[in-house]
Image: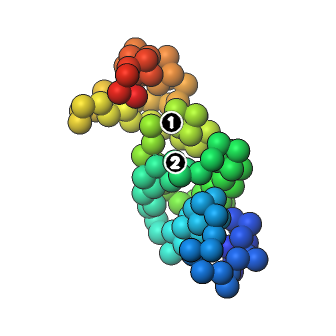
Amino acid sequence: MKWLSRFGIEHLASQMRYTLSGGEAQRASLARAFALEPEILMMDEPFSSVDNISRQGLIKTFKEVQSASKTTTLLVTHDFREVQALADRVFVISNRKPEAQGTPEEIARHPVWKALATADSY
């Protein structure tokens, strides 16, 4: 229950997944991942299915839980706002090749990021 509580969904513990909203289901998925107490947690676009308003709160909660648990997290995302909110280090991969690495601030100033941010495929 502590993980459900940390993600603010302890009141949903007895609910079936199909009865949950998208945001509730995503919170449940994240709680389940952290409940395993892994040393390293890989998250692939964990906020992509959540609406923008819910996303902000979920990112805040995720950061708090991740920090408190001291879990190393590898986050795959195409959203630089998520990178800025969550990342300590960033690795940019484009066309299956590593293009840049650094802090979010360093990447924001890097030419490769500027090119990717304005590309149609982004």
Residue drawn at (54%, 67%) of the image: 29
Q: Nearer the viewer, residue 52 or 94?
A: 52
Residue drawn at (65%, 42%) of the image: 52
Task: Check disc 2: other Cα within 10 Å, few if <14, some if 14-19, many if 20+.
Answer: few
Amino acid type at circle 1 is Asp
Q: Quadrant of the C terminus?
A: top left
Disc 2, disc 1: CB below 8 Å?
yes
The residue to which callout 2 is attached is 48
Q: Earlier in the sequence, mark 2 or mark 1?
A: 2
The numbered mark at residue 79 is 1
Say which of marks 2 and 1 sits in front.
2
Residue 99: x, y in percent? 31, 27
Count every numbered label the image shows and give the total: 2
Q: Quadrant of residue 19?
A: bottom right
Q: Quadrant of the N terminus?
A: bottom right
Residue drawn at (30%, 30%) of the image: 94
Seen as rendered, the residue at the extreme bottom is 14
Task: Check disc 1: other Cα within 10 Å, few if <14, some if 14-19, many if 20+.
Answer: few
Amino acid type at circle 2 is Ser
Q: Is residue 82 left or right of residue 40?
A: right
Q: Relative to 38, does residue 42 appear above or below in the rendering?
A: above
Q: Relative to 54, does residue 18 appear above or below in the rendering?
A: below
Q: Secondary structure at mark 1?
A: loop
Residue 32: x, y in percent? 55, 72
Q: Relative to 110, does residue 32 appear above or below in the rendering?
A: below
Marks 2 and 1, how far apart in space?
A: 9 Å
Q: Nearer the viewer, residue 41 or 51?
A: 51
